Image (cartoon, helix red, strand yellow):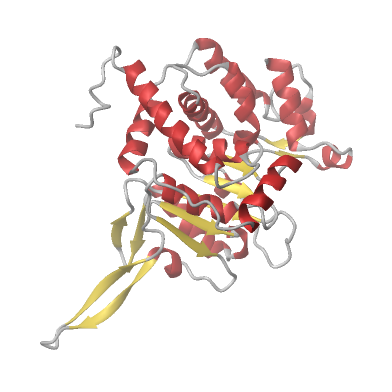
Amino acid sequence: MNKVDILDEREAPRRLKAAAETFGKVRAGLNAVIFGQDEVVEQTLVTLLAGGHGLLIGVPGLAKTKLVETLGIVMGLEAGRVQFTPDLMPSDITGSEVMEESAGGERAFRFIKGPVFTQLLMADEINRASPRTQSALLQAMQEKHVTVAGARHDLPKLFHVLATQNPLEQEGTYPLPEAQLDRFLLQIDVGYPDLDAERRMLLATTMGEEKSAVKVCGPDDLIEAQALVRRIPVGEQVMEGILSLVRAARPDSNHASGVQAQIAWGPGPRASQALMLAVRARALLDGRLAPSTDDVVALAGPVLRHRMALNFSARAEGATTASVIERLCASLF
């Protein structure tokens, strides 16, 4: 039995403090290599601590690939990368069976694992692959196993996908359907670094040898922290805030904010589950024993923006999903 499973309430604060210190060092290690992306680093760690997958959206050159590579090093995870292209096949993701002949002439099939059999997988430009290939990965994300030739093959206990999308180049791409987007715990928008961060990045990467990442923890630390996240208590006010926010973002809601007339479709119950886990993970990352409504506000955008869409009239008036979520948060908290 895992030591977290038998943890009594008196031990919880000490365990949470130890986990917070460990992942505080992880965050510092990432920020030492990834410049000007503090929020992105935080949201990525929240995604992993909550046991979910993340969708990173940003233009090229903002260190999305470097972030995943550095995460693997700092957290001691086995990391892999797949560059999605239009000709990528599902078997290129999941693996395939090959016929082998022994020295005695006997033939048998052997399963060769695909890149999905890793602890941290970067799916680079996921929307460039065909829907069939996207579905192969997204099914693995949901089911935590793949089926090849009728045989089930379980993925590692720790399995996280960080997929990337380029918001600019849409020609020749296959946008992810709404049902598949819902598989991602957070949508992490990667923006440009500020002036000071870009200046530090220039000096650190063009003068002498770049600073390399250092291992801080291992897979067992992440597994234990994920178990702790699910045991963090959530107050009634925070829980009601999560439910009110998610339900108010649906077109059939009668919330007083009046934004429902702008919403074409809204988030389902999986959004509530994602937000509940994410606020707990953020509390642990900050060394707090329980989440607050500030965590709900901070994570409302990453949890909801890929789980809802505005109607044509709202978009014509210049409204955005981000602005609608901000209005909802302002009216509720």
Quarter of the figure with the C terminus: top right
Q: Position of residue 13 (x, y in %)?
A: 36, 16
Kindly identify the residue that appears in the image at 32 percent across and 46 percent down.
Answer: 157
Q: Using the rendered image of the protein, determine whether residue 160 is visible from the camera's viewpoint.
A: no
Q: Looking at the picture, tell me which residue is in the foreground, 186 or 68.
A: 68
Q: Tell me which corner region of the image, top left, top right, bottom left or bottom right, holds residue 23.
A: top left
In the rendered image, the vertical position of residue 212 relative to residue 283, given as above or below: below
Quarter of the figure with the N terminus: top left
Q: Using the rendered image of the protein, determine whether residue 31 is visible from the camera's viewpoint.
A: yes
Q: Looking at the picture, tell me which residue is in the foreground, 121 or 27.
A: 27
- How many numbered circles are shown? 0
Q: Residue furthest right?
A: 317
Q: Tell me which corner region of the image, top left, top right, bottom left or bottom right, holds residue 313.
A: top right
Q: Position of residue 124 (x, y in %)?
A: 56, 59
325 sits to left or right of 238: right
Kindly identify the residue that appears in the image at 37 percent across and 54 percent down.
Answer: 78
Q: Position of residue 221 (x, y in %)?
A: 33, 37
Kindly identify the residue that appears in the image at 62 percent across and 45 percent down.
Answer: 35
Q: Tell me which corner region of the image, top left, top right, bottom left or bottom right, holds residue 18.
A: top left
Q: Looking at the picture, tell me which residue is in the foreground, 27 or 203.
A: 203
In the rendered image, the vertical position of residue 234 relative to residue 214, given as above or below: above
Q: Position of residue 208 (x, y in %)?
A: 59, 58
Q: Residue furthest front?
A: 208
Kindly identify the residue that appears in the image at 43 percent across and 50 percent down.
Answer: 72
